Image (cartoon, helix red, strand yellow):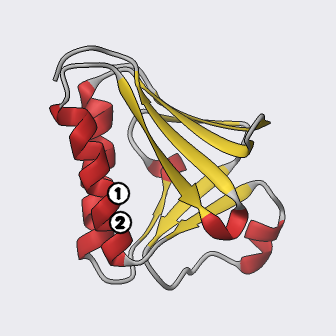
Amino acid sequence: MTSLVFNYYIGAYGKTIYIMVEEKEHLLFLKELFYRLATTSYLEYRLSEGPNVLLSGIREIVLSNGKVSTEASEFASNEVILWNQRQSDWYDSEGLIDGLIQSDRKGHQYFSIEEKEIVVEVDKLFDGK
């Protein structure tokens, strides 16, 4: 299995996290993670701890649906990004990932981390379900 790559950079649209999806298993991982964030109270997930996850241009991305135990000073360093949404928003995000899973074609979805003004692009790089 190849790595699920999260590449952070500053591009034409500003701060961007580009998620390169080369296998269906990557989409299933994201769908399951977003579902857990939608259905579990106060969940915090550090992507560096994910299976076959590769972070590029950033030390850590923390996904959360509420309270965050990570120190605020860690986020201030610009080496750690917090992606925090309400549970209902994670549920919507899970549905968008499901659309990529159900599609027979390559495609992409955009999300945003509004408080940090970061665009998140999930790019499905393969045809088929």
Rendered position, 51 above or below 69: above
Q: Secondary structure at mark 2?
A: helix
Task: Residue at 26% x, 14% y: name it.
Answer: 127
The residue pinned by badge 1 equals 93
Task: Residue at 39% x, 82% y: name it.
Answer: 42
Is residue 85 found left or right of 40 in the rendered image? right
Quarter of the rendering containing residue 36 = bottom left
Residue 69: where, in percent of width, then height? 57, 81
- The outermost residue toward the right is 77
Mark identifier at residue 30: none
The residue pinned by badge 2 equals 90
Q: Which quadrant would the C terminus be assigned to in this image?
A: top left
Quarter of the rendering containing residue 108 = top left
Q: Are marks 1 and 2 in contact (CB under 8 Å)?
A: yes
Task: Residue at 35% x, 66% y: name it.
Answer: 90
Residue 43: where, in percent of width, then height? 39, 74
Rendered position, 124 above or below 27: above
